[in-house]
Amino acid sequence: MRLEDFLLMRHELLLTLIAVIVLCAEIFTKEDNKLFIRPLTLVLFLAVTLIGFIPGPTGTLFGGMYKSSELQILMKNVLNIGVFIVFMQSARWLKHEDNHNKIAEFYILMLSTLIGMNFMISSGDFLMFYLGLELATIPVAALAAFDRYSNKSSEAGIKLLLSSALSSGILLYGISMLYGTIGSIYFDQVSVAYAGSPIQVLAFIFFFTGMAFKISIVPFHLWTADVYEGSPVNVTSYLSVISKGAAAFIFTIMLYTVFGSIKPLWQDVLWITSALTMTIGNLFAIRQKNMKRFLAFSSISQAGFILLGIMGGNDIGMTSVVYYALVYIFSNLGAFGVVAAISNATNGKENMDDYDGLYGTNPALSLTLMLAMFSLAGIPPVAGFFGKFFLFTAAAKEGFYWLLTIAVLNTIISLYYYLLVVKAMFINKNDEPIAHFSSDAYTKMGLAMCVFGMVIVGFASPIWEYILSLSYGVL
């Protein structure tokens, strides 16, 4: 292979190199020095994240199975930023005595699933797509069950594994139908030969169902809350942001490049599922008392809003999906970062009423969580407002005004339950509030990155314009 070929896959190759280095460090490091793996991995991953922003070649490999474009590279960089924040927020949790001997396992599993997502994003045929999907899914199930002393964590891992196996089987069956009727698994060839026959429409339904499980689209969302609640907080944050962002990106690409000939059909399907996902996610979020379940249904609702951008089907739509993924990373990781910090400092306090009077003892964390809630709700001037605005604009360009009305009403509903968290921290009284505590430097830096992203990304118009310039001609 030429040097340019290696540069095309630099994200995947560098992440693989980090995983090998972490594995070697685990083997050759003495038991008392295992914590050395934590700063080593953070430094290496930060270097890879920065290298990803260096301009490099684009093109295809393996006969078109692997594709690399500037927009795909940008999406990988966005995911790297999110994973780096997750690593920062996980530092104190990994230092706990129960996880002290599993630091390398955590990083290797996390890097493995990220490599799978990168392959999925750069896939040029269904085989590469499916391999990337499975590589991204199986390690996450192990991460969900990472807390070996928790029955809920074991239950979360089993539920995620079983639901993933079912959804992957359905998706793979749909792919086999396409191959049986068309004779090819390459996206370019399938898009040309796809005629919309009944069996091909059935193949699309199976494909859509499999992807809907991954993105937590109603009615394929039932696993989400239980898995989020049972998993360690840092794993839950990864599930809610990184995996969902990667799946939404490739889902958008495939709908328009592979199934573009039946656009009216799947737009109707997305119309219904988007309305249901936003509404059901919001209504169930109102009832939640556990913060992880609360944010789980919030993420389900957010998936419904992301479908608005996917339905846009134009440059604005593609741009809004990538832009919202960036905004959502900062917003959701900011919320989960505070939840993780409190959980680690209080031995597992994760209910909303535990946060009563939090501002009086931990004002910095309270303000950070407030900004995250405002951003998720779409309250100006934080970045979440601009993210939702562009999603609405993409849908409006296609004339989905009734769906936009439902989306606006759901945004109003979401204001209520997001403000419940703010009310708990700033207004509710608590005779025994969570005592003041100081987070470690890693957590502070991770939360600072989230706050910076929530405040700056919305006002930095060059970010939107840059994404838009890369989206021209993609769909």
Image (spheres, grey):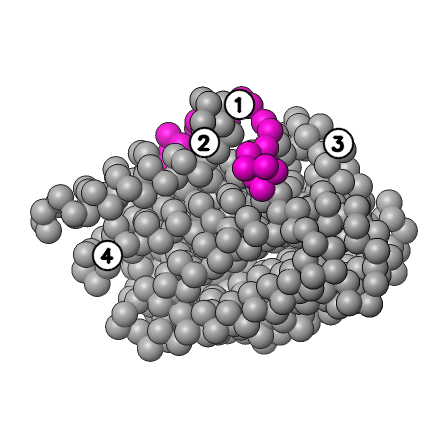
Residue 315 at x, y = what percent? 77, 37
* Residue hosting label 1: 56
> Marks 4 and 1: which is nearer the front?
1
Q: Disc 3 to disc 2, how far (Cα)?
A: 24 Å
Which of the two discs, 4 and 3, labels the residue nearer the N terminus? 4
Q: Secondary structure at mark 3?
A: loop
Answer yes or no: do the residues labelled 4 and 1 have beta carbons within 8 Å?
no
Which of the two discs, 2 and 4, labels the residue nearer the N terminus? 2
* Residue hosting label 4: 102
Q: Amino acid at mark 3?
A: Tyr
* Residue hosting label 3: 472
Which of the two discs, 2 and 1, labels the residue nearer the N terminus? 2
Is residue 102 among what the camera can see?
yes
Q: Which contiguous range is marked in magenta?
A: 45-67
At 55% from the left edge and 48% from the top edge, which residue is drawn?
128
Q: Disc 2 to disc 1, how far (Cα)?
A: 9 Å
* Mark carried by residue 142: none
Q: Disc 4 to disc 3, how far (Cα)?
A: 44 Å
* Residue hosting label 2: 10
Q: Disc 4 to disc 1, how far (Cα)?
A: 35 Å
Q: Disc 2 to disc 4, how far (Cα)?
A: 27 Å
Q: Nearer the viewer, residue 431 or 456?
A: 456
Answer yes or no: do the residues labelled 4 and 3 have beta carbons within 8 Å?
no
**If the image is split into quadrants, where does the C terminus sit?**
top right
Q: Is residue 63 magenta?
A: yes
Answer left or right for 207 relative to 393.
left
